Amino acid sequence: MNANYMYSLIAVIILLLLAYVGVAGMHLEVLFGVIIPYAAIAIFIGGFIYKVVDWAKSPVPFPITTTAGQQASLPMVSPALIDNPKNKTGVVIRMLLDILLFRSLFRNTRFEVRDTNKFSYELEKWLWLFALIFHYAFLTVVVRHLRFFTEPVLLPVQLLEKLDSFFQVGLPVLYLSGVALLAASIYLFLRRVFIPQMRYISLPADYFPLFLIMGIAGSGLLMRYFAKVDIVSAKELTMGLVTLRPTIPEGIGAIFYVHLFLVCVLLAYFPFSKLMHLGGIFFSPTRNMPGNNREVRHANPWNYPVKIHTYEDYEDEFREKMIEAGLPVEKMPEPKENLEEGKKE
Amino acid sequence: MADELPKSEKLIDVDYSPPSRGWMDTPVKIRKGMYCYAGNPKSLELLGAPNPRQWNPLDEDWKLPDNWKEIVFEGLRERIDKFRSFKVFMDICVRCGACSDKCHFFIGSGDPKNMPVLRAELIRSVYRNDFTKAGKILGRLAGARPMTLDVLKEWWYYLFQCSECRRCSLYCPYGIDTAEITIIGREILNLLGLNIDWIATPVANCYRTGNHLGIQPHAFKDMMEFFVDDIEEITGVRVEPSFNRKGAEILFITPSGDVFADPGTYTAMGYLMLFHYLKDLGLDITWSTYGSEGGNFGFFTSHETMKRLNAKMYYEAKRLGVKWILGGECGHMWRVIHQYMDTMNGPADFLEEPVNPITGTRFTNAKSTKMVHIAEFTADLIYHNKLNLDPSRNDNLRVTFHDSCNPSRGMGLLDEPRYVIQNVCKNFYEMPANTIREQTFCCGSGSGLNAGENMELRMMGGMPRANAVKFVKEKYDVNMLACVCAIDRAALPALMDYYHPEVDVTGLHEMVANALILPGEKKRTTNLRGEPLLGMEDEDAE
């Protein structure tokens, strides 16, 4: 039993019950259907902007690019124009590959000891694969949900729905993204539990968003395929939110409010958590700076003068030894007699 | 000390299972062999560094200032505001674990606090507690913990078990760079006078005498004269280096370690021979006793100390009136030059864009900083066929190349040294792909950790490198580990000696000089080490 994930699991269950009891038992539909969603969105947008502005306010004093390939120097070497970008184009491509395809994670290797002292570092693509599935499934789900916030439904959203239900399984048609999201979050959870090092580094703050997302995906699937929530009423509510004319239609069912509430919690939690890596990745100086650091000078806004030991200080200390060794000096010492005369005076 | 070091067979049997108690509940145990002695107060005084005093990491009392917590808090706050890197890296880690098995110190020790993610969490936990809403409200649930003396000691212990190699930053999906966190963490520790002597004293030496080893100008020249004599004995040619010479076209700066100890000395001799060879072709170069250090242990102390030491390079270049600077083989020196020098101490508008006087090549990649790496310089010479080389003189060598962390991940100098090696030596074999180039492993002693008292730590940290060397040794009979770093040349011999005594360590320019045919040289029978060349064993016996 691991306290870190138990805390998070219990927290998510409490949240879930809160919404369920709140709506099914206490009929707080207005609270869960209007007030909390608005508050969550406000916190999300405000918090996100605050955080990004806060990062941007700290300057970048030094170009600390992590160079992941050959520099552009001489004709006999072929430079890695993406992994060690020498200009903005290279940086943009590097960033896009990292943001869209998780290129850095794609490098991932797994260290293993074989036959007592043979080390191996084999490519390990599972984390990359499931991370990619997780994020793209999430994105698809989010975009698909635009159906609930637009009237008429945008064409790209409709196309995405078609693609997402490509296999035409079940009724209502199964969306791959929902299942993929749930499966990937379960994988990400299990590796935290079963890999000893992962378990050791994982905090409650690592499990909490996973459980929350599982809860969101789970309640979503439940609504669509089993509980069969009244979609027309649900859309009436969501459209009301978007058009700033909130309404609470009758009979949507508590499970919808549970789903919505967990989404709200996720939104409100987002800016204060590690989920801000969504914004942070754009600000990472090891990735968003070029490697041409000797070619183009980077200015540090807070560069300040420091006390240094000048050549003159150095020569003053070692002048005689330097002269004796035949090293050139800037200042010849005054002849000894003068010095002594000076002392007498 | 040597007898306390466990046998390599024992050390390599690492236990990777983390303790059953959580890391926040596992207090640090400072263990002999794993840490370096505390900084000498005299060195701290010379630099005007905070809280100089005698202290011992094993003692309960570290003689901290009474308001140390406030100093740490303010130190953190100042750096959060000054370094976007630090602020972002504190906020966005998701603990995906991609970095966890990338650190040589983790691979070698199995200590979970040597996983880059956890090393960073040591600081992040305090950051969350003091600077984030979630941490203030939720405390431990948000991964926050208050600063205590134990936490401080843990910082010191583990921040001096990171060699700032940046291997983890390569794999991190967000580019979080533990080196950056370690650098800033050490900077904060230095505010309390928490340092190690292997860094503090070289820094003080460098500040005063121009180099880490504290070699005074006349002694520096003397040591070079020894090399001149040795070169004459081996080649019959007397080279004539110049020092502190005004009006030279190029200033040469290299780590003092290569002037001081084998096998770096052979690389220093290599530079002397190369420069002598090029003299007739038009090279006008000078050494400096004031700028007699390429390395910069200030980088391992604080950004300010780094700048104070680095300032000498431009200062001396300006005083001597040279056009540009050529830099020798070194690791962290090149990270400082490539990514910090121009920003800190530039713009060097009194210098000119470097041009190779022999080939006419413009080093446009060093247009602003005006400092060229000698591997770039020599590769350019070879490319233009300016060197008369006899690679067969390196036939006794079966070479592999160890990429140093900083030139690899903080610059991208990967193929220039390989190009040079392949032109001066016939037998070259690469170590496994995941252990070289940008994925290279640290020697285990970088960032000022190459002391004697922490030998166990160094052997742990060097384990992955040693293991990769073992692979090529068994497969290709490799007997020489080449590198372009003075710390490597100081550290790797001990590592090889511990794991595979049959493998030796060399610098790039030692091999260049062995192959280089000097005009008017006598028939060479030995290499720079005085070892007989292949087929010359009899002549050596005479």
Image (cartoon, coloured by chain):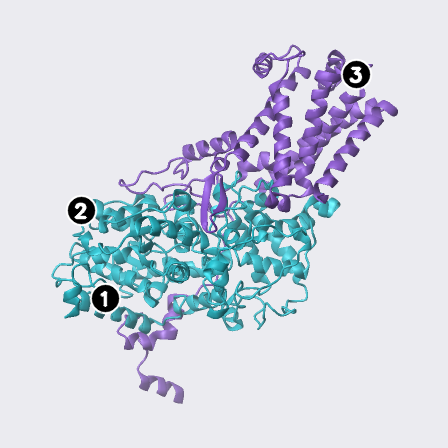
Question: What type is the residue that disc 1 sits on?
Answer: Gly
User: Is circle 2 on the same chain as circle 3?
Assistant: no
Q: Which residue is mark 1?
A: B530
Q: Residue furthest bottom?
A: A344
Between the C-alphas of marks 1 and 3, the distance is 90 Å
Chain hosting mark 1:
B
| Disc 1, SS | loop
Q: Which residue is mark 3?
A: A252
Asked if B450 appears above or below A112 in the picture, the reply is: below
- Colour of chain A in the image: purple
Residue A18 in percent (x, y) is at 81, 30
* Contact? badges 2 and 3 (CB < 8 Å): no
Between the C-alphas of marks 2 and 3, the distance is 82 Å
Asked if A176 appears above or below B194 in the picture, the reply is: above
The residue nearer to you, when weighing A296 against B241, is B241
Q: Nearer the viewer, mark 1 or mark 3?
A: 1
Give the crowd class for mark 3: few <14, some 14-19, many >=20 residues within 10 Å: many
Question: What type is the residue that disc 3 sits on?
Answer: Ile
Residue B173 in percent (x, y) is at 52, 38
Report whether B525 appears left or right of B439: left
Q: Who's the residue at 29% across and 65% down the image?
A: B244
Q: Can residue B387 be seen at all in this image of the molecule?
A: yes
Give the crowd class for mark 1: few <14, some 14-19, many >=20 residues within 10 Å: few
Residue B8 in percent (x, y) is at 46, 60
* Contact? badges 1 and 3 (CB < 8 Å): no
> What is the number of the mark on residue B385?
2
Q: Can residue B300 be seen at all in this image of the molecule?
A: no
